[in-house]
Amino acid sequence: MEIEPLIELLLNTTRVAVLTGAGISAECGIPTFRGEGGLWKKHRPEELATPTAFSQNPNLVWEWYDWRRGIIGSKDPNPGHEVLAQWEKVFPSFSLVTQNIDGLHQKSGSTKVLELHGNIWKFRCTEEGTITDNHDVPLKKMPPLCEACGALLRPHVVWFGESLSPTILQKAFLTSASCEAMFVIGTSAVVQPAASLPLQAANAGAKIVEINPDPTPLTSYADFSFRGKSGEILPAIDKEFSRRFKEAKE
Ligand code: OAD
């Protein structure tokens, strides 16, 4: 797809929103959920990512998260994450909403990230609800227990059948309702409510920019569809945009 019309749009836009999914971290070597090599091809979500699975077998669930923390912890952000961290400083209003729990946006320098599905580097006490950061890989104790009250800790992530944080979700919907352009990057756009954010943005008049090697249910709503890897396409867009932005300021 031609990059020029998108550059023109970005040069005249002050409110940009972004929704990312597992695909933005795929080039770092972190498996996505669906498609070839996806986690849900090899593992059953109902055995590993539901409240019932956790109450029946907390050790099994924690072993799975420990394994994933091992993979994620050894990875660095890719150029796609880095461009988004830069854009936070470039656009007067910039919101980054992610379905990812890997923390790679923050690792690349993004400071305002709305994490719809939580964060794998956080524990939550099943009794008190307190949230703590923890970066141990592997976990020191299996399953981990709350230092304050001794109760079982759980990953601070959203499992199937659970609701998202209403505060975060409300911010995400406000963002999509008020942006002028929304990038939808590396998501299969099949999991709700995240998948409805771009539709809300489109209904409110925003231009939708999709970056994904494959088409998704969202593709027919996209004004710009870039078929390819976000770690390559975002830097290409940013290079041309930065050049033109600088030129326009001179
Ligand atoms: P999926 O695994 O469903 O989709 C990943 C998307 O990334 C696919 O559309 C791929 O085509 C695309 N993709 C792959 N490589 C890419 C690359 N290099 N650049 C850009 N795109 C690429 O992941 P999500 O849509 O994030 O939820 O999944 C949504 C939710 O489903 C997850 O947050 C998780 C899962 O169940 C929970 O665990 C609650």
Image (tube, helix red, strand yellow):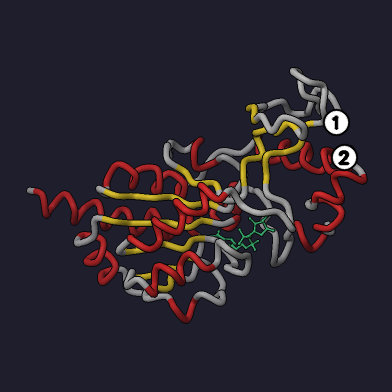
Q: Which element carries disc 2, helix, strand or loop?
A: helix
**Horizontal arrangement in the rendering, residue 5 relative to residue 168 (left or right):** left
- 145, above or below 154, in the image: above
Please tell me which residue is depicted at 48% across the width and 57% down the height of the picture. Answer: 19
Image quarter for ligand 1: bottom right
Mark 1 — residue? 143
Mark 2 — residue? 58
Query: Residue 214 in the image: x percent, y percent?
Result: 56, 72
Residue closest to the eye, 96 or 1: 96
Q: Which quadrant does the N terminus fall into?
A: bottom left
Q: Residue furthest left?
A: 250
Query: Residue 63 in the image: x percent, y percent?
Result: 84, 39
Report how many numbered discs are placed on residues in the image. Answer: 2
Please tell me which residue is depicted at 59% across the width and 47% down the height of the picture. Answer: 28
Rendering quarter of residue 11: bottom left
| Amino acid type of the residue tagged 1 in the rendering | Pro
Residue closest to the eye, 248 or 87: 87
Lower position in the chain sequence, tag 2 or tag 1: 2
Q: Which element carries disc 1, helix, strand or loop?
A: loop
Query: Residue 107 in the image: x percent, y percent?
Result: 51, 35
